[in-house]
């Protein structure tokens, strides 16, 4: 019941958020939140560390941008085509990488993602380093998506739908098998499960959801560039997941919100610190975002091993356990004969 109340409160906050913050910034947060959740489905619940998830985000963005700009397709078809393209790419990469484990799996995904990056750099329809510009927002079921507020609620619906699919997957029998593979793969094999097949399905689903996030991001920002397919984007989503809490449902969302907010507001924070301390170096803080995010990552690894949400959950669980133990102790003492 508490979880349902928290979900309703979070949804109410999300519905009211455009009244207090810039809708485009909020939509960017939602897109990266969905991207981090898609990645967490793979690493947090299947135990597969992919260094190539930027390929799916960028593929979804480029395909959606091309479909809306050049082909003139309606928004639903453009997004659907982007999701299918990312899913097919995930199937190809998964078939090549899934039979390897550990660092070998990670390196194969990184190598394949770099191939996608160079393809995006050279392909004529991506416009190379210039990227796709002026992607039209169009309309959806008669709604004018050029209005930021209208588009925000469409993006929120996409985010909620993607997150609900992830939750349903995790709590399904399929999700329980994924958890078993992560915890003890040899035992899952001994029980008769086709482990490679389950891994591949999880990889394709994660890729398709990452493509959905990329397509939505392109629709929001009206452009797509090589940044989304660069290997640093794969590192960024790993950072989001670890900071928020790997293997938790809302941890990647919190991590994405923290990292994206930090990157966008670091310059303002530096200006404020420079004015408050009269130290001019702080005014260049916005240009040193990589250093700051690196320090956040180090601090998280040293101080918050489970991530922000994971540490909070562990603290609440320990308090509940202590309270239950105290209740049992008092009940035992009350029932002890004098």
Image (cartoon, rainbow, N blue to C red):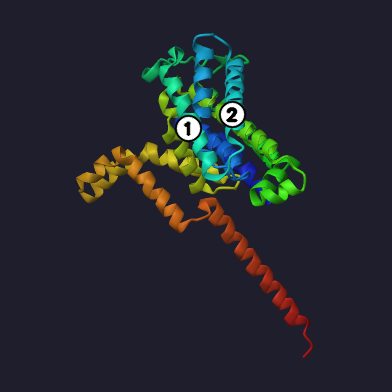
Residue appearing at x 41%, y 20% in the figure: 121
Does the image show residue 327?
Answer: yes
Q: First in sequence: mark 1 or mark 2?
A: 2
Q: In the rendered picture of this protein, how many numbered marks are placed on residues? A: 2
Disc number for residue 111: 1
Which numbered mark, 1 or 2, is in the foreground of this view?
1
Asked if the residue at tag 2 contacts the one at tag 1, i.e. Cβ–Cβ closer than 8 Å, the answer is no
Q: Up-down: is 294 above or below 67?
A: below
Measuring from the top left, give residue 249's x and y in whole percent: 61, 45
Measuring from the top left, give residue 165's x and y in whole percent: 67, 34
- Which of 332/229 is in front? 229
- Which of 188/237 is in front? 188
Q: Find the distance from the CA under tag 1 to the CA under tag 2.
A: 14 Å
| SS at circle 1 | helix
Q: Which residue is mark 2?
A: 90
Residue appearing at x 25%, y 40% in the figure: 284
- Which of 88/312 is in front? 88
Q: Is residue 23 left or right of residue 87?
A: left
Question: Quadrant of residue 315 in the image?
Answer: bottom right
Q: Residue furthest bottom?
A: 338
């Amino acid at each position: 019941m508490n979880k349902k109340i928290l979900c309703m409160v979070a949804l109410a906050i999300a519905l009211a958020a455009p009244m207090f913050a810039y809708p485009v910034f909020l939509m960017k947060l939602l897109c990266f939140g969905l991207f981090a959740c898609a990645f967490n489905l793979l690493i947090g619940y299947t135990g597969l560390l992919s260094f190539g998830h930027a390929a799916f985000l960028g593929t979804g963005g480029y395909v959606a941008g091309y479909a809306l700009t050049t082909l003139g397709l309606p928004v639903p078809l453009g997004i659907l085509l982007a999701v299918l393209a990312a899913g097919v790419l995930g199937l190809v990469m998964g078939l090549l990488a899934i039979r390897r484990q550990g660092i070998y799996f990670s390196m194969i995904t990184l190598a394949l993602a770099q191939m996608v990056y160079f393809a995006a750099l050279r392909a004529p329809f991506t416009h190379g380093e210039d990227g796709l510009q002026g992607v039209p927002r169009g309309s959806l079921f008669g709604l004018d998506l050029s209005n930021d507020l209208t588009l925000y609620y469409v993006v929120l619906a996409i985010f909620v739908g993607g997150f609900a699919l992830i939750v349903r997957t995790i709590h399904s029998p399929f999700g329980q098998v994924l958890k078993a593979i992560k915890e003890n793969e040899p035992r899952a094999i001994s029980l008769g499960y086709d482990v490679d097949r389950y891994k591949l399905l999880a990889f394709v689903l994660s890729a398709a959801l990452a493509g959905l996030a990329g397509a939505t991001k392109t629709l929001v920002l009206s452009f797509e560039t090589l940044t989304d397919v660069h290997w640093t984007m794969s590192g960024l989503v790993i950072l989001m997941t670890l900071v928020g809490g790997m293997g938790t449902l809302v941890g990647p969302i919190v991590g994405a919100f923290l990292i994206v907010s930090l990157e966008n507001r670091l310059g303002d924070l530096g200006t404020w610190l420079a004015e408050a301390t009269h130290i001019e170096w702080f005014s260049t803080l916005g240009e040193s975002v990589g250093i700051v995010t690196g320090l956040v990552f180090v601090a998280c690894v040293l101080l918050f091993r489970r991530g922000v949400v994971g540490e909070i959950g562990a603290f609440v669980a320990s308090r509940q356990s202590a309270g239950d133990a105290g209740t049992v102790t008092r009940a035992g003492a009350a029932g002890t004969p004098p």
